[in-house]
Image (cartoon, rainbow, N blue to C red):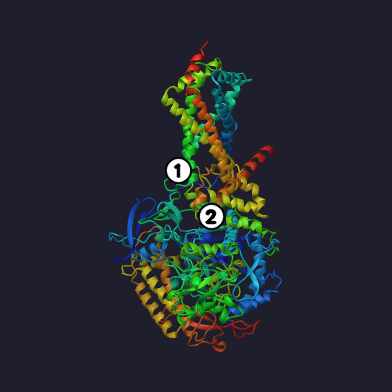
């Protein structure tokens, strides 16, 4: 039998990890990516990657990493896969080290580790302030190596449109659009791995990259896949507000001693230097003395939100607080944080070594995603998912530096599992549904291209982003969520009237964007609908009207499925695997 | 007072064989605006300064944090990243053109795949035995890490190639980025197993010898990678390698 | 694979080709060009400038120096092997290098880029000058190898033309510039000065060397045209 042919969609950490495993096992891979894979969003991860290597003599163990992750995720994550991830993490770090990732080192030449949010251990390996970039490059290089031996074919500049399903609903390939020639084509495969990252674009401005639209997940969802825990959206406490996007200021800024504060009195207009220590309100340190500035992200985000909107202490009355590194000496800052400090300097114009940074929370990470089983396969046979686009590892809130490990771990599992699945896959009947799916996509494309309405897709997107950011991020009210859902339905109606100002058949970015937008709108309803139904507060999902966690009713995975009707997605709930750690209250203001 | 505006002149070309035209845009100024946000603004309202309907601009972008390397273009004549080009630091009208050394796709979008091909040809990777758990990696002292880390920061934006007078279709010069990666991987305790192969590759046509040491690469590099140091080091190693090869027969 | 019918699409121009890893011989030719610029060409330049400096001592001393040089064993062979052919190769290949580079000083007016451009123009001046100089002083007119004593007069006579004098002065500066920066480039490109600080320091050293060489050269020119030079030239009679 010929070697299985696997399609991997997405060339970030998870996708590349899967590709390497498949190539190593003798399979051949077609790797699809909108951008050259080396430009994937994984490059944006700054702070580090967690693994309980216990190289600091603190008695850290993988069990403690597991507990921190489950606790940080407010017990919503299924425990079996999380446990496996935490146990695999030290080996993953070693592998990355062998691949040449320039991790920071101790004087003895061993890996250095720093502290990150949500833990009391130095558990985070890091490569300066560009860990994600370094990790992605290491995997990119390995994939290039397999490319040179013919195991990998890259389709960079192709956008995934849909899965090709046969008459039994089994995946047999994909359809994709060449973003340069606008050619629509279908590709056969024995299994597909979706590794398309987060969905930041549905919030308009976020810390995510331009390609993080969730379009692929949404397309699969509309073809019958469950989308799980969509309502769990991480808002990073420290982002730099910008015109085009929100730029992340890594948690490592706090990990290295950065302090968050505002002036104690409302309307204090003094420049920061003239505000004495006694007039500064280090609210995280006061409210959470044990973890201080390193409380988990959802806690820090809500605290900043509160200090700005309830205490009205934002700097100059603006929604911003100080993140201060100026008490740390320049040499240390340059050695450990240079990369992120340069970002601030470049995009804001102030030197954070001299002036405290002004930051505010921004949408950052998608905890929810395509529902997968413990083998990383969605409910559509033959479609696997790995990385941020699936829901498995972070529960209701992700801990800092856990995303890189979950991406690589998920990729490493999905690759071999897809191979095993593909080896036992019976041959397709007929053409496996290729012609039908291609015709369906051609019709969608044709309708969009010839549509004669009045709506500009970029404007619709802006409205979507504003609505989602307002109602579905830090603080959620059922009334607002209902308004948001109505707004999305309105936008969906208006989307039918979309008129592309560019109707050419060559590198037409408006066309590609409009297709993404259609999918983004569908997924937005999953996020909003899930949030509306979850009347509790858990992890990143916070409803002031329901401030407590409600395990009895909601210690459950939300599973959304597509109905195609105007009522929106259908929601059902699945019990969470809690066999190892019994849920307990999650409190960072006291010992857990 | 009239609202502050931003004037842009953008070189448009609908396809590789279509004629190039300059289009002018006038946008409302907002604090913190960069070239990308200006082009996003144009996409929501694709109308030129003289009121003509046009199409949104085609350009590469992704992270907008100057780490993915996508949005390199020529802004007021100079190659740089559009995301980190703050409007208030630029002379107006801001003239925006595609990179000139790479095949044009459309508008500001060019094909820079030659860099990735070059990286493949110099085996820019560490040949690990496999991805299974083989224990920890080789010891690397902090001093070595600090020397190598800057090289590993290359974002493949190709600005160094664009500004190099020697990088063109006549020379087929490989460019500074790839040479720096050769240094990086030759420095790695395991990566150096291919050191000789990489050095021989770089002695091929279009190799390190084509460098004219104009040093534009190191001036323009948005990541301040010590590219000229890398070229110098690698050049020496290539020469020594070629002499060794000659003497060994 | 199934595909949807699509109108004919434009094609991209080929662009810069990737590295021809390990292929071709350009490395050898380029390195030869670079090396010849130092040895023997640079070495000969220094020797020549120092020899010319003898002119300061007068026509007779200069004649003696010329006679000495022409008395070296196998001098005609040495002249071709270590002077004419290397210079010819360095010049021709240099022009080839120039033609394949595309200066962009308009957009990137940085020091290194100016020096890159200057190295090409000074090289061009040097080629033209050396061609002229060798033709007029070595091959045309009175043959100096046979009449070394006449050397001073021959140079003096030529430099009495103010245009030619100006040409000599410009060329002297250009040649010294080209050589001094050439040494700097050689050190940078052969990895002798791989650090930025080393390159800056060595840059000053090369600047001093260039100025000293140009000073010697211009002083020598002055010796051929300054006060008393006419009388000295007249004193040397052709046999």
Q: Secondary structure at mark 2?
A: loop
Which sits in the foreground, A35 or B163? Answer: B163
For the question of whether residue B226 can be seen, the reply is yes
- Residue A81, given in percent of the width and then of the height, sits at 62, 75
Mark 2 nearby-residue class (10 Å; few <14, some 14–19, many ≥20): some
Residue at (61% x, 48% y) in the render: B198
In the image, which disc is placed on residue B224? 2
| As drawn, A398 above or below C47 | below
The label nearer to you, 2 versus 1, is 2
In 3D space, how far apart are the residues under numbered discs 2 and 1 (Cα atoms)? 22 Å
Q: Secondary structure at mark 1?
A: loop
- Residue A137, given in percent of the width and then of the height, sits at 57, 59
| Residue corresponding to mark 1 | C103
Quadrant of the frame with the C terminus of chain A: bottom right
- Residue B241, given in percent of the width and then of the height, sits at 65, 43
- Residue A62, given in percent of the width and then of the height, sits at 67, 74
| As drawn, C67 above or below A228 | above
Quadrant of the frame with the N terminus of chain A: bottom right
Q: Which of the chains bears the disc numbered 2?
A: B
Mark 1 nearby-residue class (10 Å; few <14, some 14–19, many ≥20): some
Relative side of A510 to C82, left or right: left
Outermost front residue = C227
Which sits in the foreground, A18 or B170? Answer: B170
In the image, which disc is placed on residue A272? none
The answer to whether dots 2 and 1 both sit on one chain is no
Outermost top residue = C239
Q: Which of the chains bears the disc numbered 1?
A: C
| As drawn, A108 above or below A301 | above
Residue A404 figure quarter: bottom right
Residue B93 figure quarter: bottom left
For the question of whether residue C128 can be seen, the reply is no
């Amino acid at each position: 039998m010929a070697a299985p042919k696997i399609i991997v969609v997405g060339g970030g950490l998870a996708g590349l990890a899967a590709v390497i495993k498949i190539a190593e096992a003798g399979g051949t891979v077609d790797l699809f990516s909108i951008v050259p894979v080396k430009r994937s969003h994984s490059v944006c991860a700054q702070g580090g990657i967690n693994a309980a290597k216990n190289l600091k003599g603190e008695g850290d163990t993988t069990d403690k990493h597991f507990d921190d992750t489950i606790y940080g995720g407010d017990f919503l994550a299924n425990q079996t896969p999380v446990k496996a991830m935490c146990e695999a993490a030290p080996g993953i770090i070693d592998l990355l080290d062998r691949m040449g990732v320039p991790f920071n080192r101790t004087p003895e030449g061993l890996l250095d580790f720093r502290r990150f949010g949500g833990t009391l251990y130095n558990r985070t390996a890091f490569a300066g302030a560009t860990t994600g970039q370094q990790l992605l490059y290491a995997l990119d290089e390995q994939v290039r190596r397999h490319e040179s031996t013919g195991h990998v074919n890259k389709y960079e500049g192709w956008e995934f449109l849909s899965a090709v399903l046969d008459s039994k609903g089994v995946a047999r390939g994909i359809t994709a659009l060449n973003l340069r020639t606008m050619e629509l084509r279908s590709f056969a495969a024995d299994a597909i791995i979706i590794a398309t990252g987060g969905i930041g674009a549905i919030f308009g401005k976020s810390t995510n990259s331009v390609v993080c639209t969730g379009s692929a997940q949404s397309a699969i969802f509309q073809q019958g896949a469950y989308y799980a825990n969509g309502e769990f959206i991480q808002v990073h406490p420290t982002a730099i507000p910008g015109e085009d996007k929100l730029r992340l200021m890594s948690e490592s800024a706090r990990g290295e001693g950065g302090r968050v504060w505002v002036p104690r009195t409302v309307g204090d207009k003094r420049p920061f230097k003239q505000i004495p220590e006694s007039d500064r309100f280090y609210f995280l340190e006061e409210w959470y003395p044990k973890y201080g500035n390193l409380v988990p992200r959802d806690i820090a985000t809500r605290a900043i939100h509160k200090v700005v909107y309830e205490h009205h202490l934002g700097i100059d009355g603006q929604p911003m607080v100080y993140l201060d590194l100026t008490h740390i000496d320049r040499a240390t800052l340059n050695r450990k944080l240079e990369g992120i400090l340069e970002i601030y300097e470049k995009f804001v114009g102030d030197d954070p070594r001299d002036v405290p940074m002004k930051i505010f929370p921004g949408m950052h990470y998608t905890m929810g995603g395509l529902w997968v089983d413990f083998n990383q396969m969605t409910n559509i046979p033959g479609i696997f998912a790995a990385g941020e686009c699936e829901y498995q590892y972070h529960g209701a809130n992700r801990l800092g530096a856990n995303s890189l490990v979950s991406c690589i771990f998920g990729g490493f599992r999905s690759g071999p599992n897809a191979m095993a699945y593909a080896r036992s896959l019976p041959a397709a009947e007929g053409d496996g549904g290729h012609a039908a799916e291609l015709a369906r996509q051609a019709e969608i494309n044709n309708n969009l291209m010839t549509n004669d309405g009045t709506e500009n897709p970029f404007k619709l997107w802006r409205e979507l982003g504003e609505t989602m950011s307002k109602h579905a991020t830090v603080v959620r009210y059922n009334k607002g969520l209902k308004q948001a859902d109505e707004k999305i339905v309105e936008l969906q109606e208006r989307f039918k009237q979309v008129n592309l100002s560019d109707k050419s058949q060559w590198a037409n970015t408006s066309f590609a964007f409009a297709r993404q937008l259609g999918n983004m709108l569908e997924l937005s309803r999953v996020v909003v609908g899930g949030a509306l139904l979850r009347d509790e507060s858990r992890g990143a999902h916070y409803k002031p009207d329901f401030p407590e966690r409600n395990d009895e009713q909601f210690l459950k995975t939300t599973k959304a499925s597509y109905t195609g009707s105007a009522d929106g997605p259908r929601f059902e709930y699945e019990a969470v695997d809690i066999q190892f750690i019994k849920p307990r209250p999650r409190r960072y203001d006291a010992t857990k | 007072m009239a609202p502050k505006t931003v004037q842009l002149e953008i070189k448009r070309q609908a396809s590789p064989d279509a004629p190039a035209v300059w289009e002018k845009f006038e946008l409302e100024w907002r604090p913190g605006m960069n070239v990308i946000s200006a082009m996003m603004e144009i996409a929501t309202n694709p109308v030129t300064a003289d009121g003509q309907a046009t199409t949104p601009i085609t350009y590469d972008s992704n992270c907008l944090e100057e780490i993915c390397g996508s949005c390199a273009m020529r802004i007021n004549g100079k190659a740089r990243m559009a995301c980190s080009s703050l409007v208030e630091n630029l002379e107006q009208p801001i003239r925006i053109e595609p990179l000139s050394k790479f095949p044009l796709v459309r508008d500001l979008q060019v094909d820079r795949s030659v860099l990735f091909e070059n990286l493949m040809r110099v085996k820019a990777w560490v040949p690990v035995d496999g991805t299974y758990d083989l224990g920890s990696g080789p010891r690397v002292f902090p001093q070595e890490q600090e020397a190598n880390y800057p090289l590993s920061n290359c974002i493949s934006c190709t600005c160094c190639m664009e500004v190099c007078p020697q990088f063109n279709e006549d020379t087929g010069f490989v460019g500074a980025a790839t040479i720096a990666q050769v240094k990086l991987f030759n420095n790695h305790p395991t990566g150096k197993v291919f050191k000789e192969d990489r050095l021989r590759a770089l002695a091929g046509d279009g190799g390190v010898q084509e460098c004219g040491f104009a040093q534009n690469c190191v001036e323009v590099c948005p990541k301040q990678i010590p590219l000229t140091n890398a070229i110098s080091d690698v050049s020496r190693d290539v020469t020594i390698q070629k002499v060794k090869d000659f003497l060994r027969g | 694979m199934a595909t949807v019918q699509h109108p004919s699409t434009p094609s991209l121009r080929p662009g810069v080709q990737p590295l021809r890893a390990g292929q071709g011989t350009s490395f050898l030719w380029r390195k030869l060009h670079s090396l010849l610029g130092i040895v023997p060409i640079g070495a000969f330049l220094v020797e020549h400038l120092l020899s010319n400096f003898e002119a300061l001592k007068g026509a007779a001393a200069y004649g003696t120096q010329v006679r000495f040089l022409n008395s070296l064993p196998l001098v005609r062979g040495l002249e071709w092997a270590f002077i004419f052919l290397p210079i010819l190769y360095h010049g021709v290949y240099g022009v080839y290098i120039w033609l394949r580079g595309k200066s962009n000083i308009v957009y990137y007016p940085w020091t290194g880029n100016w020096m890159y451009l200057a190295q090409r123009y000074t090289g061009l001046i040097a080629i033209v000058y050396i061609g002229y100089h060798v033709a007029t002083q070595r091959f045309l007119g009175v043959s100096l190898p046979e009449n070394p004593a006449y050397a001073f007069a021959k140079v003096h006579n030529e430099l009495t033309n103010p245009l030619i004098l100006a040409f000599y002065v410009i060329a002297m500066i250009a040649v010294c510039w080209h050589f001094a920066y050439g040494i700097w480039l050689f050190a940078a490109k052969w990895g002798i000065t791989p650090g930025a600080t080393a390159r800056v320091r060595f840059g000053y050293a090369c600047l001093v060397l260039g100025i000293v060489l140009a000073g010697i050269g211009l002083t020598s020119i002055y010796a051929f045209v300054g006060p008393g030079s006419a009388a000295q030239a007249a004193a040397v009679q052709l046999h």
